[in-house]
């Protein structure tokens, strides 16, 4: 799934998406270009557009299209450390942030820098290019924003099951995406309702949303788990009975 996520001032929200259907169909970068075409003119004419993307979108055609007059956007994109320059060197061999370089296959210059990220307790180096002339520190600042935005997708995937949709039809994908986003919003609203404005714990907020808004689903889930434990109760000479209390 390719998602276009907008950041406008303090506003952040997913705008649209396309489903990648595998080899022989439109690539992720081609789908991303289609998504960029959906941006309303009131945005593209009122603001400079900076497109942040990972290495999947660092293709020659994608970079060239960003510079096309129909888009005229600026790109800040990740590239692998094995990416080659026209002189045969790899980007990993460069030592100066913000320098102008020519990627192999690209007939105009881009500007290269890198960021350091923590992964599994270790520092890893990630290379970033900008189609707009920028200082190395500026490219780093923009490049880091992409990993901040990615936090939304990791939360949606691993806390709200977006990565488990397993649907084969577009309608199925839409349905699962809506369920995932609704659960995400409900958890966030409960977080705001409780008056917490720091240390957002998505798991805790989701649990509170379940208890407060969907107690019937919580009850059915608990009953299902208890039924699975029935053989264990019988083995120890116990029997579990649920009795409805009169209110």
Image: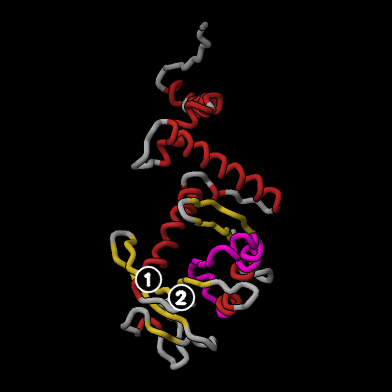
Give the Cα separation between the discs numbered 1 and 2: 10 Å
Q: Residue at x 47, y 87 (%)?
A: 102
Residue ranking furthest to the front: 46
Between 79 and 13, which is closer to the camera in this rendering? 13
The kind of secondary structure element at disc 1 is: helix
Tags 1 and 2 touching, CB below 8 Å: yes
Q: Residues within 10 Å of mark 2 (few under 14, many from 20)?
A: many
The secondary element bearing badge 2 is classed as strand
Q: Is residue 38 magenta?
A: yes
Magenta extent: 32-60
Q: Which mark is residue 227?
A: none
Residue at image coords 48%, 85%: 109
Picture coordinates of residue 230, whole percent (x, y): 48, 24
Residue hosting label 2: 130
The type of colouring in the image is secondary structure
Mark 1 or mark 2, which has the lower sequence index? 2
Residue 36 pos. (x, y %): 62, 65
Left or right: 43, with 229 as reference point:
right
Judged by depth in the image, the label closer to the viewer, 1 or 2, is 1
Residue 22 visible from this viewpoint:
no
Question: Which residue is depicted at the point 47% across and 39% down?
Answer: 188
Name the quadrant containing residue 57.
bottom right
Q: Nearer the viewer, residue 35 or 55?
A: 35
Above or below: residue 202 compared with residue 34: above
Asked whether residue 11 is drawn in magenta, I would say: no
> In the image, is residue 153 above or below residue 236?
below
Relative image position of residue 92 (x, y in whole percent): 37, 81
Q: Nearer the viewer, residue 208 or 21?
A: 208
Write down the quadrant of residue 29 in the picture.
bottom right
Residue 23 in view: yes
């Amino acid at each position: 799934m390719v998602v276009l996520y907008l950041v406008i001032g303090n506003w952040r929200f997913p705008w649209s998406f396309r489903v990648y259907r595998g080899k022989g169909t439109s690539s992720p970068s081609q789908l991303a270009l289609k998504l960029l075409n959906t941006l309303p003119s009131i945005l593209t004419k009122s603001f400079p557009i900076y497109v942040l993307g990972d290495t999947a979108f660092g293709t020659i055609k994608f970079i060239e299209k960003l510079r096309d007059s129909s888009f005229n956007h600026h790109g800040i994109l990740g590239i692998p450390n094995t990416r080659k320059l026209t002189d045969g060197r790899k980007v990993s061999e460069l030592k100066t942030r913000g320098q102008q370089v020519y990627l192999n296959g690209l007939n105009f210059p881009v500007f290269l820098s890198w960021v350091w990220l923590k992964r599994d307790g270790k520092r890893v180096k990630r290379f970033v290019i900008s189609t707009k002339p920028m200082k190395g520190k500026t490219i780093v600042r923009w490049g880091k924003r992409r990993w901040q935005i990615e936090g939304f997708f990791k939360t949606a995937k691993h806390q709200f099951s977006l990565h488990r949709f397993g649907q084969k039809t577009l309608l199925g994908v839409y349905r699962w995406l809506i369920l995932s986003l609704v659960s995400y919003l409900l958890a966030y609203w409960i977080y705001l309702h409780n008056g917490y404005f720091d240390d957002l714990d998505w798991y805790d907020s989701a649990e509170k949303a379940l208890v407060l808004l969907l107690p019937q689903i919580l009850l059915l889930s608990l009953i299902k788990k208890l039924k699975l434990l029935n053989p264990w109760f019988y083995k120890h000479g116990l029997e579990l009975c649920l009795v409805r209390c009169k209110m």
